[in-house]
């Protein structure tokens, strides 16, 4: 329980940074990864593989930053491969629904969805919600 009590605030801190600056500092990712060392349990090395879909999408399609990929791997270390994978699926599903709602509401246009880096939305807030839902 102590792990989750530290994991979600650390992930929330990264979400706020992603929303404000579109940047996730490495120390935040390290903080999330260090939570995996808190007993009981041990870091899930297999959980690191959860970031592979984001890594492949980032290489082929772009738009997914390295901070999102590293943070997803750290989440996998804390929650384990199964919970982190479900959390990632929930996060990406919520992101698609959010984009659909914004598009349907006419609040965004194609040119307005991208910032100077070509990213449409910060991923970490959705990742935080997805990981939270996968735990409960």
Image (spheres, rainbow, N blue to C red):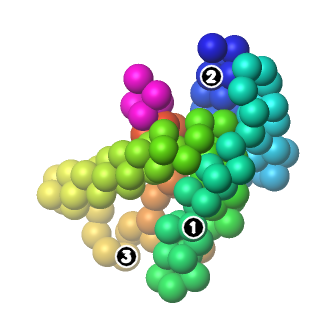
Q: Secondary structure at mark 3?
A: helix
In this view, the residue in front, 45 or 66, is 45
Mark positioned earlier in the residue sequence (1 or 3) = 1
Q: Which residue is mark 2?
A: 4
Which quadrant, please, contains the N terminus?
A: top right
Residue positioned 81% across, 31% down in the render? 37
Residue 84 is left or right of residue 102, and the answer is: right
Q: CA distance from mark 1 to mark 2?
A: 23 Å
Q: CA distance from mark 3 to mark 2?
A: 39 Å
Q: CA distance from mark 1 to mark 3?
A: 29 Å
Q: Which mark is residue 52?
A: 1
Residue positioned 68% across, 43% down in the render? 44
Q: Which residue is mark 3?
A: 111
Q: Secondary structure at mark 2?
A: helix
**What span is colored magenta in the figure?**
132-136
Residue 135 inside the magenta-drawn segment = yes
The overriding secondary structure of the stretch rendered in magenta is helix
Q: Which mark is residue 8?
A: none
**Residue 28 drawn above or below residue 60:** above
Residue 36 is left or right of residue 135, and the answer is: right
Residue count near mark 2 (Cα–Cα under 10 Å), binned few <14, some 14–19, many ≥20: some
Residue 4's x, y, as percent? 62, 22
Which quadrant, please, contains the C terminus?
A: top left
Residue count near mark 3 (Cα–Cα under 10 Å), binned few <14, some 14–19, many ≥20: few
């Amino acid at each position: 329980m102590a792990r989750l009590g530290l994991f979600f605030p650390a992930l929330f801190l990264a979400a706020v940074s992603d929303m404000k600056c579109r940047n996730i500092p490495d120390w935040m990712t390290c903080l999330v990864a260090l939570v995996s060392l808190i007993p009981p349990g041990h870091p899930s090395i297999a959980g690191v593989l959860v970031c592979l879909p984001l890594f492949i999408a980032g290489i082929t399609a772009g738009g997914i930053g390295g901070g999102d990929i590293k943070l997803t791997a750290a989440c996998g270390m804390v929650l384990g491969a199964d919970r982190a994978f479900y959390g990632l699926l929930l996060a990406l599903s919520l992101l698609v629904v959010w984009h659909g709602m914004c598009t349907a509401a006419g609040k965004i246009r194609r040119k307005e969805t991208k910032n100077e880096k070509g990213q449409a939305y910060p991923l970490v807030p959705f990742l935080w919600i997805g990981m939270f839902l996968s735990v409960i």
